Image (cartoon, rainbow, N blue to C red):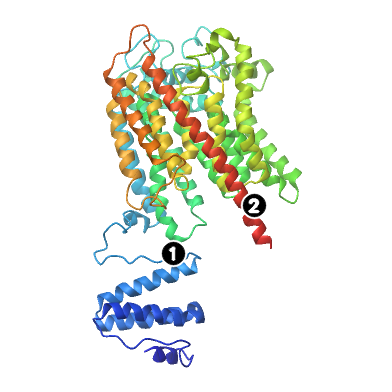
Amino acid sequence: MGCEIFTDLGLGKSPGRFPQRCGPNDGASLRHWVSSAETCVEPYGPPCRDVFGQLLQVRVARNHNKVASTSYATMQNTKKKKTSGQNKPAKTVPESGRGPDSDQWAFITTRSPISWFFCVTLFALLIRLAVALHPYSGAQTPPMFGDYEAQRHWMEITVNLPAKEWYRNSTNNDLRYWGLDYPPLTAYQSYFHGLLLKYFDPASVLLLTSRGYESYLGKLLMRWTVLMSDLMIFFPAVFYFVIVYYSGKPNEEKSGMAWHAVMILLNPCLILIDHGHFQYNCISLGLAIAAVAAVLSNRDLLGSMLFCLALNHKQMSAYYAPAFFGYLLGKCLRRQNPILEVLKLGLVVLGTFAVIWWPYLYSVDASLEVLSRLAPFDRGIYEDYVANFWCTTSVLVKWKKLFTTQSLKFLSLTATVSTFLPSMIQLVRSPTKHGFLLGLLNSSFSFYLFSFQVHEKSILLPLMPASLLALEEPFVFRWLIYHAMLSMFPLVCRDQLVLAYGALYGLFILLYHAPRGRKDTTETGPFPSILKSFALACSFSLHIVYLTVTPPHKYPYLLEAVIMLFCFSQFVLISIYSNSKQWVVSRTSRVDDKKKSL
């Protein structure tokens, strides 16, 4: 058989010794024959291997031998592994096509990206609609209500007053009642959403008289504005990132695309805050994800513009600024004309800011009015219970009593800069794509843990880069999700979203552990298994205790303090690990570059 094949190929006799012809039902010897034949054909390169594969298919068709078909599939998988530079042995697929090694995501990943993303998008929208049926922040709780009323009030202000009065205290715009405290892009978003409400339900945005307005139609329209923001900004940004992230990867790794998109789109924390509590974080986070994707695809000018848009929607997007600055500067310094590259980036940034801030650039006072609303230092270094350094340590150190606001601003600035500076320096020295994603996580954690005036909802900012790293750092992503959920649990209980919380938590666990969802079936992490089990047991216990135990009257917020202390400890450990991992990635990258240059 072997000589016949090589004669057909015009190569003469085979270079190696083929085994004797095996019987049609002798599966073991046939697999051995295929393995030996492949070894003999290997020196002649891909064309010879392809012809041999075709001839073997003919033989399989003639003999109707299922074992031979399985062996041929094995040989083809082995050939692909060798071609892609991997030495892992190929796995035979069971005849039934099922089993632990079958790809459960193949029903969508084998189709075009648009097809599977449509399926994922539809499912993600249905989950958001289900959560939107639950209560929202401040429902029927006057006089201030909650974040739902804040968003509605901003629509009321922007559609009834000129832009120059949106941030100015006046009779028609009492800044003490949910005054605008986000950059102009949020105001423009509120204006366009307000026009929608004004068209379908004018009473919902009447100046002054619509405070606390909670009609059925008004609530329906408000919920739809968040869904449309998700669909128009966040979903396309995730699609863009996933396509860019997997563009240079071999085909066998692309089976994780759908799983990765699901992990980002079905982030339970984001869904609870935007579609339960009621906010528009999907806009700023979507713009930030699109900026990351643009930068990873070497469209640095587009990435800079998108990041400026994110920064002008919510100032908390500055959590990512050190990583963007360090990575883009590091890339510019390695180009032929670094000064010109930096100037181009600077012009894009200035131009984007100028367009967005144009209504307030007519005078210095007008610009300062807006800026003063973006930095509410009078609220204190932290608000409510948040799992960061200042709130957690306030049990021992009464920061607000011992230090003035000016001193606390200096302390928080020093601590924040000190913690993100090493990560930023590393990105300037060695700007790698994986290091950039880790840098986003590290810089956002620095701001969350140490900056001034942090909310419990700000944990969404470190969660975004962690979700982008879900395939490379699955443990970090999963661990952060678990404890971010716990840190938001008191807020969720106040908003009466416990049922949605439990459902999303369970759905995340099921999707995360879906068969063949991740590239590595064996997850590794920085903590020993016994510590992980203990931490999960503590987390579960804290959920139960918070729901069932009444704290003593002397310490009404004791349970919140315990939850924040526990979550803070986990966030610190994750931050330490991710910072060290960024430097390891940098060192590995430099070693690889040296090997290539030799």
Q: Percent x, y for residue 526?
A: 47, 41
For the point 29% across and 56% down, which residue is it?
Answer: 100
Question: Of 239 and 452, which appears nearest the observer?
Answer: 452
Can you tell which mark lies on residue 490?
none
Q: Is residue 470 visible?
A: yes
Q: Disc 1 or 2, which lies upstream in sequence?
A: 1
Nearer the observer, 450 or 313: 450
**Who is closer to the viewer here, 462 or 92?**
92
Mark 2 highlights which residue? 590
Residue marked by disc 1: 88
Which residue: 37% across, 21% down? 491
The residue type indicated by label 1 comes to: Lys
Measured from the top left, where is residue 116 in percent x and y?
36, 52
Q: Are marks 1 and 2 in contact (CB under 8 Å)?
A: no
Where is 218 relative to 574, above or below? above
Residue 588: image x %, image y %?
60, 51
Q: Which quadrant is the C terminus positioned in? A: bottom right
How crowded is the residue under tag 2: few (<14 C-alpha within 10 Å), some, or many (20+)? some
For numbered disc 2, what is the local secondary structure?
A: helix
